[in-house]
Image (cartoon, rainbow, N blue to C red):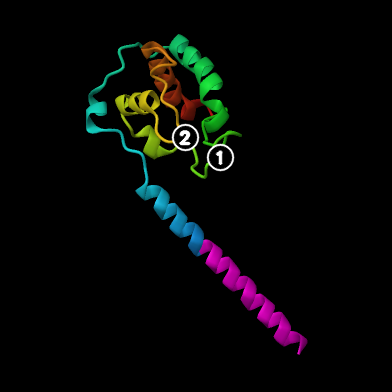
Amino acid sequence: MNTTRQTAKMLLWVAAITSGTLLLSFTNIGNVQDRWVAPKTADTIKNPYEVEPLTVKQGEEIYLMYCAPCHGDYGYGNGAAGGAAGILPANFHDPVVQKQTDGAIYWKLSEGRGNMPGFKDALSEEQRWQLVVFIRDLPKNN
């Protein structure tokens, strides 16, 4: 009889784990479908500033002040304030993010969406481009 109870408990654990895995799978599918895509016109926007160490450093300073609370110090989307409303911030190391054009990234951080504020009124054009350069540089150094 004790064996029957152990078998029943084991089956309940297997069912619980399977259900949880399926739920997570469906959640991930939803996130892919809801991926934020900049308009095609954003792809034509070109960075007018030189990519150099000073630009990266300036972008890092802005990033740590404005972006790190949500996206994390190293850009993995794991900042303390990120995901507060159930939507995780972008992981800048993700190939999907890195494959976007500079113009698309610039457009997104300028316009914002949902919990992601638009920075076109808070940061100058140059500062937003410095952020783009720093975001591009993150996977190389972290």
Residue closer to the observer: 130 or 114: 114
Q: Which residue lies under the disc numbered 1?
A: 84
Instruction: Kindly identify the amino acid type of the residue bearing the numbered disc 1.
Output: Ala
Residue 133, percent across and down?
A: 41, 20
The x, y position of residue 102, in whole percent, is 33, 25
Q: Which residue is mark 2?
A: 115
Q: Is residue 128 magenta?
A: no
What is the three-letter code of the residue carrying label 2?
Asn
Tell me if I can see residue 72 in this picture: no
**On the rendered structure, is 17 left or right of 140?**
right
Tag 1, which secondary structure? loop
The answer to the question of whether label 1 and label 2 lie on touching residues, with beta carbons closer than 8 A, is: yes
Among numbered discs 1 and 2, the one appearing first in the sequence: 1
Of helix, strand and loop, which mostly describes the magenta segment? helix
Query: In the rendered view, would you say 74 is above or below 56?
Result: below
* Quadrant the C terminus occupies: top right
The answer to which quarter of the image holds residue 45 is: top left
Drawn side of residue 7 relative to residue 66, left or right: right
Q: Quadrant of the N terminus?
A: bottom right
**Bounds of the magenta segment:** 1-21
User: Which residue lies at the image location 23% right of the left edge and 32% below the top edge?
Assistant: 40
Disc 2 secondary structure class: loop
Q: CA distance from mark 1 to mark 2?
A: 9 Å
- Magenta stretch encompasses residue 13: yes
Q: Residue at x 37, y 23 (%)?
A: 110
10 Å crowding of disc 2: few (<14), some (14-19), many (20+):
some
Residue 107 appears left or right of 81: left
Figure label count: 2
Above or below 49: residue 16: below
